[in-house]
């Protein structure tokens, strides 16, 4: 049956070519596109990034893993990349490449012919940029890095990452994707849609969370979100891996009796991410009185949302904290980032005194 189909499609293509239509169908569509219809909505760009890319002479296009040739051809036609989905299908059938289109992200030159687009998608040439998002970075820092690498405009990325409607698609009652942008090494095309970039990072987060805590999907989303807030604070507090769980245990012990977390990391978040000031070299007593819901020195309980995007170490600590009687921790060795953990205030004050004294 497949051979018959190939022969039939091939005959159609040959007839079209003989009639001179093949040349017409293989040429790029005119630059001015017709007004979109309701059926075109799914193919319309979701932000200005795609329009910017076309202005630079490329068209962004994604091929999903396992996507049928017919669907690929139809989308290329709807997006104005080719004149005829039939010609693309016919070429693929004749060349035996109908199941050989590569999955991934492509920058298709505006003005490319149908045959050229066929070859690009089969050969799988993708223009990808490698970026590494460090653990503990915030939305603003991630956005700046992506813009520096010409992947997406920072403002466009921030707009999507701070859209509660976007997070609602994941069943998360969060007002931003802060905490859900998993720190990792990514490969993105240049000038990629902001929504696709954020989605890939959030999808990665839930995939990695499922590796360490498969039962998260059966938990109350609010409880999972609260643990993520703890993880985001742990991420900004620990430097020695084995101390991350101990820091988490201190925070949970305090939350259990409604005592303020008193985390300097939350004050740093207020100063840098909310007030837009440079990262402080030290925290002053006046900072403890900053009027913000994120000030864990002023208010009990958790802040409104995550203060960073945590990695696996902090997530593991927050979802599987050890049982300890620690209530306090203070830096013991600034060079290594090690802390002294204590169970009562007198012991904690003595540890602080020794640190300040340099003993």
Image (cartoon, helix red, strand yellow):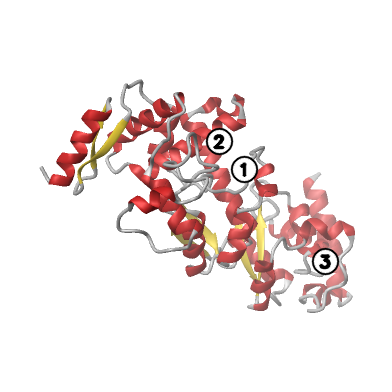
- Which quadrant does the N terminus fall into? top right
Q: Are marks 3 and 2 in contact (CB under 8 Å)?
A: no
Q: Residue at image x 62%, y 63%?
A: 156
Residue 132 seen by the camera: no
Q: Earlier in the sequence, mark 3 or mark 1?
A: 3
332 sits to left or right of 33: left
Q: Are marks 1 and 2 in contact (CB under 8 Å)?
A: yes
Q: Disc 3 or disc 1, which is closer to the eye?
A: 1
Q: Residues within 10 Å of mark 2 (few under 14, many from 20)?
A: some
Q: In the rendering, which numbered label is found on residue 84?
A: 3
Residue 351 seen by the camera: yes
Secondary structure category for the residue under label 2: helix
Q: Residue at image x 70%, y 69%?
A: 115
Residue corresponding to mark 1: 174
Q: Residue at image x 33%, y 53%?
A: 284
Q: Earlier in the sequence, mark 1 or mark 2?
A: 1
Q: Please state which of residues 143 and 26 is positioned toward the viewer in this rendering.
A: 143
Separation of residues labelled 1 and 2 (CA atoms)? 8 Å
Residue sticking out furthest to the left: 359
- Pinpoint residue 78: horizontal percent, then vertical percent: 81, 63
33 sits to left or right of 49: right
Residue corresponding to mark 2: 225
- Pinpoint residue 256: horizontal percent, then vertical percent: 45, 24
């Amino acid at each position: 049956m497949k051979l018959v189909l190939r022969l039939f499609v091939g005959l159609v293509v040959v007839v079209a070519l003989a009639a001179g239509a093949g040349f017409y169908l293989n040429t790029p569509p005119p630059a001015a596109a017709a007004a979109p219809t309701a059926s075109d909505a799914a193919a319309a760009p979701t932000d200005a990034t795609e329009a910017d890319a076309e202005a630079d002479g490329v068209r962004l296009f994604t091929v999903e893993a396992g996507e049928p040739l017919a669907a690929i051809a139809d989308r290329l036609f709807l997006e104005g990349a080719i004149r005829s989905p039939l010609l693309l299908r016919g070429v693929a059938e004749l060349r035996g490449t109908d199941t050989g289109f590569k999955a991934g992200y492509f920058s298709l030159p505006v003005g490319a012919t149908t045959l050229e687009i066929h070859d690009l998608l089969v050969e799988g040439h993708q223009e990808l940029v490698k970026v590494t998002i460090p653990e503990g970075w915030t939305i603003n820092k991630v956005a700046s890095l992506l813009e520096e690498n010409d992947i997406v405009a920072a403002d466009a990325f921030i707009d999507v990452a701070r859209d509660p409607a976007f997070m609602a698609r994941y069943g998360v009652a969060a007002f931003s994707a802060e905490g859900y942008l998993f720190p990792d090494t990514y490969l993105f095309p240049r000038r990629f849609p902001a929504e696709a970039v954020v989605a890939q990072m959030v999808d990665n987060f839930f995939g990695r969370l499922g590796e360490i805590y498969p039962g998260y999907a059966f938990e109350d989303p609010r409880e999972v979100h609260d643990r993520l807030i703890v993880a985001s604070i742990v991420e900004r507090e620990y430097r020695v891996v084995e101390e991350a769980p101990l820091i988490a245990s201190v925070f949970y012990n305090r939350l259990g009796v409604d005592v303020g977390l008193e985390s300097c990391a939350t004050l740093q978040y207020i100063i840098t991410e909310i007030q837009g000031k440079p990262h402080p070299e030290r925290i002053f007593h006046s900072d403890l009185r900053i009027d913000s819901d994120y000030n864990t020195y002023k208010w009990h309980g958790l802040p409104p949302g995550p203060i960073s995007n945590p990695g696996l170490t902090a997530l593991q600590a927050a979802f599987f904290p050890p049982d300890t009687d620690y209530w306090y921790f203070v830096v013991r060795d600034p060079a290594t980032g090690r802390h002294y953990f204590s169970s009562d205030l007198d012991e904690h004050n003595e540890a602080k005194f020794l640190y300040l004294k340099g003993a």
